[in-house]
Amino acid sequence: MSISLLAAAQSACMLALVLVAPWLDRPATRRLRANPTTPARLTLFKRIAAGLWIGAVLCTVASGGIERLWTLRRAPGEWHWLDTPALMLCAATLTTAFFAFGVWPALRCLRDGSARQRYAPHLRSLAYLLPTTPSERRWWIAVSLSAGICEEIVFRGFVLQYLRGTLEGGMPLGFGTAVLLSSAIFGLNHLYQGAGGILRTAILGLACALAAVLSGSLLLPIVLHCLCDLATLAMHNPAADAKNDASTTHQLPAATSAAAAESQAL
């Protein structure tokens, strides 16, 4: 593919990520919020997973290959403060603390299932979207892995490299500006989660970008991103909670009866 075609393809992908992609899941999530059923959730999960891989492939092809997106090296003068060992250590410590704080609730819930009650209020705004039945939880794993891989390729790979001007059709905005703006675009692509979701996702994007800069590639942010998404499974497990409740009572809570029914059927 010629340089001019690459530049045009990259600009088209960038415009789609900013102007089109944030709105694609809005109608489906609105319908799911109004009628949160297993078939509706499974349909959305499959659609999201497919869309993530399509987007990652298109951005990779438009960039001229995954090797142009996978490695993230600072050019001379870019974030030169990271050349100071003390500041590098501070950045690494803050990044580690951020992700440790993110997965700690999941680890606690894995050890003690009753801890899920403490974190339930924090998940309430997304309850309509969270997996409840075994089949939904399996597809959530697929979505989580797809998001960790594909979103890092797209936002910490393509978008960041495009905005810092290392791609043919890119915009040389500077490294710091590219990191901030790519994180904001990442947050915008989670518009269906509302303003709070956009902010939380943008902050996650900043942390993933810092992990990529510190490690030099997309591998570390991909692993951390996957872990953060998979942590939801430990924090939200209605079927397991229903079984625990059934050991002390003879009636399952209404909110978990569907999950328990499918669990028994499988």
Image (cartoon, rainbow, N blue to C red):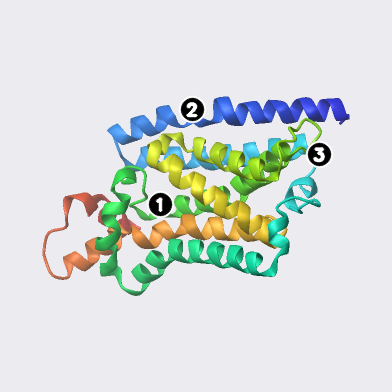
Q: Secondary structure at mark 1?
A: helix
Residue at (41%, 54%) from the top-left corner?
137
In the displayed orientation, state which residue is furthest to the bottom: 111
Residue at (50%, 40%) from the top-left corner?
187
Q: Amino acid at mark 1?
A: Ser
Q: Secondary structure at mark 2?
A: helix
**Which of pointers 3 and 1 indicates the residue nearer the eye?**
3
**Along the polypeptide, which appears first: circle 3 or circle 2?**
2
Q: Which residue is mark 3?
A: 64
Residue at (41%, 67%) from the top-left corner?
104
Q: Which residue is mark 2?
A: 23
Residue 161 found in image quarter? top right
Report the number of numbered marks.
3
**Residue 147 versus residue 23 in the image, above or below:** below
Name the one closer to the observer, 57 or 239.
57
**Residue 23 versus residue 109 in the image, above or below:** above
Q: Which residue is mark 1?
A: 135
